[in-house]
Amino acid sequence: MLSRTADHLFWMARYTERAENTARMLDVRIQTALMPQSTVAAEQGWRALLGISELEEDFDAKYSTLTQKDVIDFMVRDPDNPSSIGSCLSAARENARAVRGTLTTEVWETQNTTWLDLQQHFKTDLVEQSPGKFFEWVKYRSHLSRGVTLGTMLQDEAVNFIRLGTFLERADNTARILDVKFLAAQNGDAAEQGTQADFYYWGALLRSVSAFEVYRKVYRDVITPARVAELLMLKANMPRSLVACMAAVVANLKDVRNDLSQDTERFAGKLHAELQFSRIDDILEQGLHAYLTKFLACIEELGVRISEDFLVPGESQSAD
């Protein structure tokens, strides 16, 4: 496959997944904001979200004060923010258009319709009046895109690069969502562990990653931060867990390997093995934030390695 084609497929998938995960992060933050909390704690929660998304500096350059409305607008609509939902879905559509001949008609129409419908949503007050409904729509369109891709495309290298982009981005964003919640808890955004309020905070996080029912099936007990972290990091049969994402990255790298990719495969395999054989108690003891920060740095490096081995390094799109 031409590296330029692989590059567009990879980034089409990454941007689609990023839009979904931005919606997930905003959704859990809005649900958390509904709980009783001080003004300072609320602002810290929104700042934590901007910080872990590496957008705090850009936001402060544009807004003199921080409000929930401005953060949502910045992360949903703002065309100057390359990680906003609008920017991501636009970039996904442009990448799909560039390789339209490689995609099935159904995949292209799904991407194009998502972008067209988004323009209609932005003309209404859906985001302001029913943000939860809008975020559910974003998640649904992402699910639809993945389903149509797997259901209509030949299972060849094109799908491998789409899957690589999807799971690399998902690993990055699952780590960010988890880190946002733990940072918020440390900053006093949640009630003391074990209280009724804390149950709703962690329940909101689980629902934001479609894991509430899964948690109940796996643990059948009260929701605790340690078990939430274990589920979203180390459970191989949890679709959005870090270890599951890395397993998929390793498998798809194997299918597209070339003469340059041996070191990249080894790097990804090592990252997967570390998660596969880790215990949550050991991770929490060394510090979850430190662990996730290191993991995110590794994901960024892995993305660079994949670009150098398979894509168009000089023109490949930024992960930021």
Image (spheres, rainbow, N blue to C red):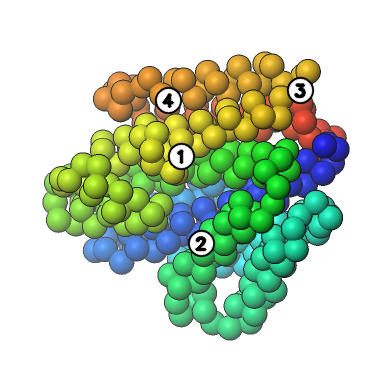
Please state which of residues 207 and 237 is positioned toward the viewer in this rendering: 237
Q: Give the residue pinned by disc 2.
A: 139
Q: Are marks 2 and 4 in contact (CB under 8 Å)?
A: no
Residue 37 as seen in the image, left or right of residue 266:
left
Residue neighbourhood size for the residue with mark 4, other residues' Cα within 10 Å, grouped as few (<14), some (14–19), many (≥20): many
* Marks 3/1: CA–CA distance: 29 Å
Q: Give the residue pinned by disc 3.
A: 258
Vertical order, 256 against 42 (above or below): above
At 60% across and 45% down in the image, what residue appears?
Answer: 166
Residue neighbourhood size for the residue with mark 3, other residues' Cα within 10 Å, grouped as few (<14), some (14–19), many (≥20): few
Secondary structure at badge 2 equals helix
Please state which of residues 285 and 237 is positioned toward the viewer in this rendering: 237
Q: Nearer the viewer, mark 1 or mark 2?
A: 2
- Amino acid at dot 1: Ala
Please state which of residues 103 and 221 is positioned toward the viewer in this rendering: 103
> Where residue 175 is drawn, which disc sits there?
1
Q: Give the residue pinned by disc 4.
A: 275
Q: Earlier in the sequence, mark 1 or mark 4?
A: 1
Query: In the displayed image of the protein, which residue is found farthest to the bottom?
Result: 124
Q: Earlier in the sequence, mark 2 or mark 4?
A: 2
* Marks 4/3: CA–CA distance: 25 Å
Q: Can residue 179 be seen?
A: no
- Amino acid at dot 3: Asn
Q: Are marks 3 and 2 in contact (CB under 8 Å)?
A: no
Q: Position of residue 123 (x, y in %)?
A: 63, 82
* Marks 3/2: CA–CA distance: 34 Å
Secondary structure at badge 3 equals loop
> Where residue 58 is drawn, which disc sits there?
none
- Amino acid at dot 4: Leu
Q: Position of residue 97 (x, y in %)?
A: 81, 59
At 67% across and 29% down in the image, what residue appears?
Answer: 255
